[in-house]
């Protein structure tokens, strides 16, 4: 079990309220000293190394493998192929739940995408396994690969990835467009992106009879236990997973990926512990991606600048064998007031791995286009783009008509604009130059992401020595769960954070749900909060019924916890330490569990979203077309902020991904072979420090009484939205050129 006590942290907080404090990461010292154990750092004795051999074709069949050559290589212990792969209890192509993704586990000789695992070589050393995999020299029956969005076969989806209807309409879009004073009808394209967490997918697997023990990074411990238990025909609780730290996930580690299951199968086959780590180029296939989109936006604007219609028709892709796709159009449901809105999809089946949730799935690719098209509409209307957004501010959620649970977007616009200096921006493009003669442009984009709540459980224990232990199987991808959740738990117990031990990151703890949908702090935090209040209620029951307690008879007034004491709600000077209550009752400790889930009635009544406004400055070389982001200011309203240091860091991470979306990230697929041609971090560009300008993230105060009792919304994904559009709009403002294909490159400007 992973546990962290805050005494490791140099920063001691003795405040009554831990939340709101910019604590540094509890596990920070472990990470920077290399003592934090990531999954692949584990080496059980007798461990073997497994390496996947992956397909170099995108469609066809494997007709031959030189297994003898691989087996003959010194150190190779076994080669796992379709012929000897241990049996599974469920067909990996079976799908009984939309989020039960199909995977390639050597079930047959079909090749469905380039980079698909087609065999696994297991050896005493990593070098021997790698060489063995290279010696397999597969022979194929090759069929033509279908790549690109113009591929013939498409389908009309039954449901959008996240569950909303594939065709959504409110009002009459065609009438709105017909009646408009001006129309913007434009098609934007976004490029495929592949999740490239610093830590690639990996597993260290060991079997003991029908019990499976795993070191495996995951964003969802309990769901992974379920999925693996189902595949191997064992009880989920027989799958023990340790995942104390993840080197990033971004959605791709929500579910066990095919190669990780192959590592577990290799351990089954050899009867020894096995480690399997994907090589960087193997990240471009079997572990998900964000598919390309082609989005046709139609926007109608009345003479006064008010919107009359918004439509987004998105063409995107899924694999030939599963259904997930990028719900890019949906962000139009919530962002701007319009009497008519329509979103629709058509999905092309391509010979790729199945797309998957990737940080702000849908919102990222849908907001960079919507924010660009809205900017086009604003310019057409002769209005400042910020004034245009304010004119079309949605006071209620447009698609549903529901009031927002809270929405401080106007404050985000105001505070961001003030900080950025927006008021001096010329309306016309190509008006500003810097001292070096570079073209300067300013753009704005609106950020938005739903405030979600999933289900989670937690336990809280108060001990006789006055300290507490709180537990939930939470996941820290680097976002700061170890710290923020401990702050929430300590506050619930009325204890200084140094007196609270926090256990997370293993599957033997209460189920913390999934670290996804930007909902982990809210969900796991609410479970810890509830567990804390429940254990205090037990303590109060004992004290208020005991005539030796100063709290005797206070049952009706109620009690609250303050600094390790339980005190009367109506008179906080009257009370006693937790320790005294336990001691008199002869208890070594007292514990309670707590659950969290979304409040269905509140969710029915209110639309729940975080919002923000991002302002970007770019500088562009007028001769070379080179684009640099020189300044980013984001202002975000995301409910209660538990740890402003972590939140700023999350928002920066998101905003940097926005830079990446606008200017860098692009998986280039070879049209003949169907292979990603830049499957490495040298040529699959993401921003490096030199690409990241001075950034600011303003945290706009927002009280939300409806999202959950703590008022927490999420911050993990919203930073990606808004930023890309702001940069694209700044590029237009600098040059007068509207680029409708992302990422934008200098080739688009010269
Ligand atoms: Mo996220 S794409 O919900 O991990």
Image (cartoon, rainbow, N blue to C red):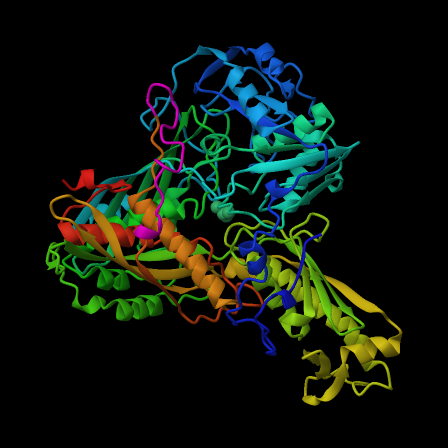
Q: Does the magenta stretch include residue 686?
A: yes
Front-most of 298 and 453?
A: 453
Give the left or right position of residue 370, taking residue 746 as reference. Answer: right
Rendered location of residue 388, percent (x, y): 23, 60
> Residue at horizontal 10%, vertical 58%?
431
Q: Considering the image in quadrants, where does the C terminus appear?
A: top left
Left or right, 640 with respect to 691, comes to: right
Residue 234: x %, y % from top left: 75, 34
Q: Residue furthest right?
A: 586
In percent of width and height, residue 15 lies at 59, 78
Left or right of 517: which side holds 685? Answer: left
Q: What stretch is highlighted in magenta?
A: 670-690
Question: Does 365 sit above or below residue 110?
Answer: below
Q: How many labels does the image show?
A: 0
Give me the residue at 23% from left, 68% from top.
421
Main SS class of the magenta portion in the image? loop
């Amino acid at each position: 079990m992973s546990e962290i006590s805050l005494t490791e942290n140099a920063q001691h907080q003795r405040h009554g309220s831990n939340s709101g404090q910019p604590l540094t990461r509890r596990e920070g010292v472990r990470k920077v000293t290399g003592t934090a154990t990531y999954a692949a750092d584990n080496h059980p004795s007798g461990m073997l190394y497994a390496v996947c051999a992956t397909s170099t074709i995108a469609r066809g069949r494997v007709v031959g493998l030189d297994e003898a050559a691989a087996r003959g290589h010194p150190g190779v212990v076994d080669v796992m192929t379709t012929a000897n792969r241990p049996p599974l209890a469920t067909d990996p192509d079976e799908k009984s739940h939309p989020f039960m993704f199909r995977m390639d586990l050597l079930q047959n000789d079909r090749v469905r995408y380039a980079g698909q695992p087609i065999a696994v070589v297991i050896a005493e050393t990593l070098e021997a396994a790698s060489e063995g995999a290279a010696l397999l020299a597969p022979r194929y029956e090759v069929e033509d690969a279908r790549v690109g969005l113009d591929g013939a076969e498409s389908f009309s989806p039954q449901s959008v990835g996240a569950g909303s209807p594939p065709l959504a309409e409110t009002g009459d879009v065609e009438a709105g467009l017909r009646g408009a004073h001006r129309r913007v009808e434009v098609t934007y394209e976004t490029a495929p992106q592949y999740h490239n967490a610093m830590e690639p997918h990996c597993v260290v697997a060991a079997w003991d009879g029908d019990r499976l023990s795993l070191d495996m990074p995951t964003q969802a411990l309990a769901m992974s236990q379920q999925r693996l238990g189902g595949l191997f025909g064992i009880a989920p609780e027989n799958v023990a997973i340790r995942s104390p730290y993840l080197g990033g996930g971004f959605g791709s580690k929500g579910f066990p990926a095919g190669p990780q299951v192959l590592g577990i199968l290799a351990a089954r086959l050899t009867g020894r512990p096995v480690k399997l780590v994907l090589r960087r180029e193997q990240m471009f296939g079997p572990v998900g991606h964000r598919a390309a989109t082609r989005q046709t936006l139609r926007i109608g604007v009345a003479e006064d600048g008010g919107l009359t219609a918004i439509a987004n028709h998105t063409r995107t892709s899924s694999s030939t064998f599963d259904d997930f796709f990028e719900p890019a159009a949906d962000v139009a449901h919530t962002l701007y007031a319009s009497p008519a809105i329509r979103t629709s999809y058509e999905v092309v089946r391509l010979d790729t791995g199945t797309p998957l949730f990737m940080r702000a799935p849908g919102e990222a690719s849908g907001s960079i286009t919507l924010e660009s098209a809205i900017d086009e509409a604003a310019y057409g209307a002769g209005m400042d783009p910020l004034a245009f957004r304010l004119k079309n501010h949605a006071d209620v959620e447009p698609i549903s008509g529901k009031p927002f649970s809270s929405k401080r977007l106007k404050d985000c616009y105001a505070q961001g604009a003030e900080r950025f200096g927006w008021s001096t921006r010329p309306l016309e493009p190509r008006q500003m130059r810097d001292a070096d003669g570079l073209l300067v442009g300013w753009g704005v984009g609106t950020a938005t992401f739903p405030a979600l709540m999933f289900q989670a459980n937690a336990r809280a224990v108060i001990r006789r020595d006055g300290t507490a232990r709180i537990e939930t199987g939470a996941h820290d991808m680097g976002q700061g769960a170890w710290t923020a959740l401990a702050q929430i738990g300590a506050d619930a117990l009325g204890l200084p954070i140094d007196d609270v031990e926090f256990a997370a990151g293993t599957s033997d703890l209460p189920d913390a749900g999934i670290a996804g949908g930007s909902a982990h702090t809210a969900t796991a935090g609410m479970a810890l909060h509830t567990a804390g209040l429940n254990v205090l209620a037990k303590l109060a029951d004992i004290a208020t019924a005991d005539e030796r307690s100063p709290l005797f008879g206070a049952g009706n007034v109620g009690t609250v916890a303050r600094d390790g004491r339980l005190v009367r709600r109506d008179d906080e000077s009257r009370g006693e330490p937790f320790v005294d209550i336990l001691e008199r009752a002869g208890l070594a400790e007292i514990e309670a569990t707590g659950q969290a889930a979304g409040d269905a009635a509140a969710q029915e009544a209110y639309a729940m979203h975080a919002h923000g406004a991002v302002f970007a400055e770019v500088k562009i070389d007028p001769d070379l077309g080179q684009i640099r982001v020189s300044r980013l200011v984001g202002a975000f309203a995301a409910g209660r902020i538990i740890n402003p240091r972590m939140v700023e860091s999350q928002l920066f991470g998101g905003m940097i991904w926005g830079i990446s979306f606008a200017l860098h990230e692009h998986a280039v697929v070879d049209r003949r072979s169907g292979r990603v041609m830049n499957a490495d971090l040298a040529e699959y560009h993401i921003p490096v420090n030199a690409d990241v300008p001075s950034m600011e993230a303003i945290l706009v105060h927002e009280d939300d009484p409806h999202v959950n009792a703590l008022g927490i919304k999420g911050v993990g994904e919203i930073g990606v939205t808004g930023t890309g559009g702001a940069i694209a709009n700044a590029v237009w403002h600098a040059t007068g050129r509207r680029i409708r294909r992302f990422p934008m490159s200098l080739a688009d400007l010269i």
